[in-house]
Amino acid sequence: MKIIYPGSFDPITLGHLDIIERVSKKFDEVYIAILNNNQKKSLFTVEERIEIIKDACKSFKNIKVVAFSGLLVDFAKSIDCKLIVRGLREVSDYEKEVQMALMNRELYNDMETLFLVSNAKYSFVSSSIIKEIISFGGNVENFVPELAYKMLKSKYLHK
Ligand code: COD
């Protein structure tokens, strides 16, 4: 059975990676689907995000890293998959996630969302907080995969 893990992943963090590792043990194929959204300003290009995720996931054999634009349900239809996984950190994630899950099910009949509670070690980690910390010179090495850390440093610290 296949499952989609959609997100912005700008950049991927160890919290995201923990979710990927857990689903990769339970499903045959995991599609990491990166939203390519020209309207949202991102730090990393889609190509950079793909490179970082592929490097971080090289030990998992059942991962596919892809970009999509437009509606997630349209991407899901294109690969004939009706299951999404999302991570839940604090209670603040819940409201937004439930709304998305219900809307996706309205848009694509029987589309289900599986929620995994984040690893307590990373429940306070988010891509935006990582970018904020490094922009002020703080160390984020313990929260992102190696290549993400290298690329974050070259974007922020070697200007
Ligand atoms: N531990 C565990 N999980 C985490 C952590 C952590 N530390 N950090 C983030 N997560 C989870 C998030 O809760 C989320 O489930 C997932 O990882 C990805 O997070 P992000 O922030 O990279 O991605 P988002 O939330 O910006 O992704 C939003 C989408 C791109 C999925 C959404 O906007 C979308 O589907 N857009 C396409 C247009 C569409 O279909 N819109 C209608 C939606 S109803």
Image (cartoon, grey):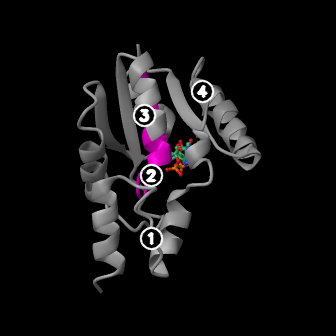
Kindly report which numbered mark, 4 or 1, lies closer to the viewer in this rendering: 1
Which residue is under mark 2? 13
- Does ligand 1 reach within 8 Å of label 3's beta carbon? no
Looking at the rendering, which quadrant does residue 139 occupy?
A: bottom left
Residue 76 appears in the figure: no
Residue range highlighted in magenta: 3-17
The amino acid on which the numbered mark 3 sits, given as a three-letter code, is Ile
Dot 4 and dot 1 residues touching (CB under 8 Å)? no
Looking at the rendering, which quadrant does residue 57 occupy?
A: top left
Looking at the rendering, which quadrant does residue 64 occupy?
A: top left
The amino acid on which the numbered mark 2 sits, given as a three-letter code, is Thr
Marking on residue 113? 4
Which residue is under mark 3? 20
Dot 3 and dot 1 residues touching (CB under 8 Å)? no
Marking on residue 139? 1
Disc 1 element = loop
Q: Does residue 6 belong to the magenta stretch?
A: yes
The amino acid on which the numbered mark 4 sits, given as a three-letter code, is Thr
Kindly report which numbered mark, 2 or 4, lies closer to the viewer in this rendering: 2
